[in-house]
Amino acid sequence: MKKYTITDGELSSVIELAIGAAELRKEVQMLRKQLEKAEAHSQPYYQLCPKCHGQGIVSKPPLLAGDVNEWTGSESSYPCDVCNGAKTLLVK
Ligand SMILES: [Zn+2]
């Protein structure tokens, strides 16, 4: 029976493959940890309303265009039309 002798070149290829596999395993573990973190962050949470900043009211009438800065109206504040006065938003 002929004995197969591994050459130095083949040996270094095998070592390289083994190192590559170990690195991939480390990367997969890291990605799995990141995924777990991302999943934890995807839980619904409450956020301060970005329009009224948690006040529930705004001084601009809700139907006014965004580029209009002057209007006539007797009301000094209006319910926020984003959170409807809830002051917070549930982010999912
Ligand atoms: Zn609001």
Image (cartoon, rainbow, N blue to C red):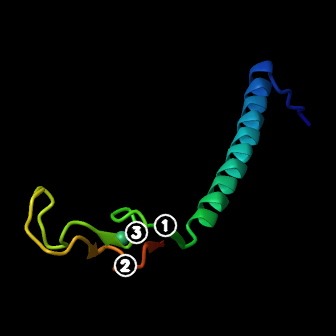
The location of residue 15, given as percent across then percent down, is 79, 30
Amino acid at dot 2: Gly
Q: Residue at x 33, y 63 (%)?
A: 51
Q: Nearer the viewer, residue 9 or 45?
A: 45
Q: Residue furthest top?
A: 8
Q: Which quadrant of the structure image shows residue 27?
A: top right
Residue under label 3, please give it: 55
Q: Is residue 80 above or below residue 3?
A: below
Q: Earlier in the sequence, mark 2 or mark 1?
A: 1
Amino acid at dot 3: Gln
- Crowding near the residue tagged with mark 3, few <14, some 14–19, many ≥20 C-alpha atoms within 10 Å: some
Label ID, residue 47? 1
Count the numbered circles shown: 3
Q: CB of residue at label 3: within 8 Å of ligand 1? A: yes
User: For ligand 1, which image quadrant applies?
Assistant: bottom left
Residue under label 2, please give it: 85
